[in-house]
Image (cartoon, rainbow, N blue to C red):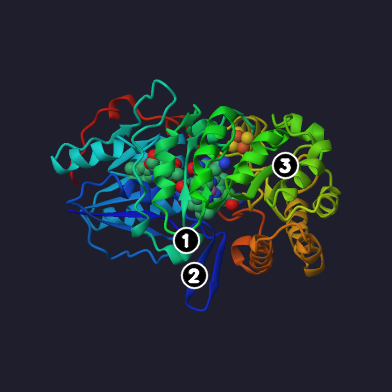
């Protein structure tokens, strides 16, 4: 038996030089984790469309496709293709978990939620000729996520990623920012046993890795235990944390000692009222400078994320933010557009207010304007967003940010270079020419797309 596991091309973060394609991001764990659950006697091939060509003519007995919202239309298109060739297709991932009723007609079977347990069960059922249409993650009583295998990194094209080694210790987040999908997908904060995480890090060849947890230090006790356990491994690592967690200087020291050299922090806005409005009032704008210097003093590079298009944003927000990231000397700034992912409170609020401009999931990459902004036109928001990117990564600004004696790594240089290339794409590629897909803005997901019809819940799959 042969299984082909695919992630569609996410387009962003891609660097093409001649025939070479590279993702300027970390390697996802999605396919490598799923591959590790496949029985040993089954051949498995992994294809990440962001770094590999998708082999449309490949032979396989079963195809599994992972979908995040921005890639859902591409996932459905790929599913149509392989099903057209007579190969059964399983869909899973973040978007399938949020809108299972939308995904189901595109697939022979879907997996809702985490794949550990459900995916091996599905494979077993498929081989025994009793696959069902719908599989769900099982309940975990203690918020402890056991049974995650060591990812099959050997099956992924390592040279395709800026950071080929990734590890995940937790899933979910205890906060509920209004725009964030995380709570719709992982309603509970789950922690893996520290010993399992250490096992995965030990399995890494090389001395650098990234944690792809969305909120690594939400549970401070757990974080302490984890960082203490990985310190002897003497590896350098990066990850994502919330700004408020950076007040804990004891934890910061521990992180730095354990090898942390890079953190992505969602500052989102320089306006406290905006932060309150998006349920992220735990970010205190007055503290930003101190938090950033606290990290830099410890040799940790800061990728600071800011979002445009909030209801309080006036037309001067772009210039103000460009100035702010310079003043704060954010090592690697990153900008996104306020995007109402389905399942979030923002989605509901925008839908009720009739402010959603596009339901075409292709536009949900935080690089398109999909909601009507409150205090400017969609075009003004889009132009301002692109302008802010261009200005921030002008050579003199980037150089000023990165020419500092206290950060020793090449991370800032490479990060700023990557975004300078991204700015060229923002201004050059047809996909970024208009605020959203004007010709195909889609329609709202009907109620039946949010859940699985009762009669399908235990329905058996039958080959077409
Ligand atoms: C690596 C990563 C990426 C990679 C690849 C994403 C991908 N999967 O296609 C890249 C760099 C392309 C990327 C880009 C973006 N990303 Co991203 N990314 C991640 C990140 C940090 C890690 C993914 C991962 O490895 N998870 C670990 C694996 C094990 O979990 P998993 O993918 O959920 O898979 C499990 C289950 O879902 C299930 N499963 C998944 N797929 C399948 C398929 C089958 C067949 C089966 C059976 C099961 C199954 O089984 C797995 C094991 O349990 C996640 C956050 C996170 N920690 O998950 C965000 C995340 C997926 N990204 C997100 C976002 C918002 C973005 C960007 C918009 C960010 C940006 N501005 O750059 C862009 C979007 C690009 C686009 N065109 O749409 C959101 C998704 C929101 C949504 N509703 O889609 C997440 C959840 C982060 C967040 N804070 O909300 N991202
Ligand atoms: S944006 Fe960050 S802090 Fe807010 S809910 Fe999402 S993961 Fe948690």
Percent position (x, y) of residue 197? Answer: 43, 40
Disc 1 is placed on an element classified as loop
> Does residue 252 show up?
yes
Q: Nearer the viewer, residue 81 or 32?
A: 32
Q: Which residue is mark 1?
A: 50
Q: Which residue is mark 3?
A: 267
**Cβ atoms at labels 2 and 1 below 8 Å apart:** yes
Tell me if the residue at label 1 has its CB under 8 Å from ligand 1.
yes
- Pointer 3 or 1: first along the chain: 1
Disc 3 is placed on an element classified as strand
**Cβ atoms at labels 3 and 1 below 8 Å apart:** no
Q: Measure the C-alpha gap from mark 2 to mark 3.
A: 30 Å
Q: How many marks?
A: 3
Q: Is residue 414 above or below residue 279?
A: below
Residue drawn at (79%, 62%) of the image: 391
- Pointer 2 or 1: first along the chain: 2
Residue drawn at (42%, 21%) of the image: 142
Q: Measure the C-alpha gap from mark 3 to mark 1.
A: 27 Å
């Amino acid at each position: 038996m042969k299984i082909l596991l695919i992630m569609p091309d996410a387009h962003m973060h891609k660097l093409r030089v001649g025939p070479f394609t590279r993702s300027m991001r970390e390697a996802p764990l999605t396919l490598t984790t799923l591959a590790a659950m496949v029985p040993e006697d089954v051949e498995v091939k992994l294809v990440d469309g962001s770094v590999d060509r998708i082999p449309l003519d490949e032979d396989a007995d079963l195809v599994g496709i992972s979908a995040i919202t921005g890639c859902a239309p591409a996932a459905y298109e790929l599913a149509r293709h392989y099903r057209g060739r007579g190969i059964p297709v399983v869909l899973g991932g973040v978007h399938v978990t949020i809108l299972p009723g939308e995904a189901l007609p595109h697939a022979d079977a879907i997996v809702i939620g985490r794949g550990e347990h459900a995916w091996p069960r599905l494979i077993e059922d498929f081989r025994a000729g009793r696959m069902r249409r719908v599989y769900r993650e099982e309940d975990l009583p203690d918020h402890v996520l056991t049974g995650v295998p060591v990812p099959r990194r050997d099956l992924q094209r390592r040279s395709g990623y800026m950071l080929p080694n990734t590890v995940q210790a937790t899933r979910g987040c205890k906060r509920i920012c209004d725009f964030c999908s995380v709570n719709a997908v992982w309603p509970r904060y789950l922690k893996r046993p520290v010993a399992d995480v250490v096992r995965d890090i030990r399995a890494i060849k090389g001395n650098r890795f990234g944690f792809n947890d969305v909120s690594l230090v939400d549970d401070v006790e757990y974080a302490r235990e984890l960082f203490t356990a990985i310190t002897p491994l003497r590896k350098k690592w990066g990850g994502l944390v919330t700004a408020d967690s950076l007040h804990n200087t004891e934890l910061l020291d521990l992180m730095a000692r354990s090898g942390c050299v890079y953190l992505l922090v969602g500052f989102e806005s320089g306006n406290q009222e905006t932060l309150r409005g998006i349920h992220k009032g735990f970010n205190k704008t007055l503290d930003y400078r101190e938090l950033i210097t606290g990290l830099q003093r410890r040799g940790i590079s800061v990728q600071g994320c800011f979002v445009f298009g909030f209801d309080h944003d006036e037309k001067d927000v772009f210039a103000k933010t460009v100035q702010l990231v310079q003043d704060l000397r954010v090592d690697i700034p990153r900008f996104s557009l306020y995007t109402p992912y389905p399942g979030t409170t923002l989605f509901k609020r925008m839908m009720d207010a009739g402010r959603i401009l596009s339901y075409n999931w292709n536009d949900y990459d935080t690089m398109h304007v999909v909601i009507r902004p409150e205090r400017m036109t969609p075009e003004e928001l889009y132009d301002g967003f692109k302008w802010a990117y261009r200005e921030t990564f002008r050579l003199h600004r980037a150089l000023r940010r990165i020419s500092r004696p206290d950060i020793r790594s090449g991370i800032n240089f490479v990060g700023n270079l990557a975004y300078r290339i991204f700015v060229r794409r923002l201004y050059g590629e047809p996909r970024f020419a208009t605020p959203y897909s004007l010709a195909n803005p889609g329609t709202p997901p009907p109620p039946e797309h949010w859940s699985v019809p009762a009669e399908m819940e235990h329905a058996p799959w039958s080959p077409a």
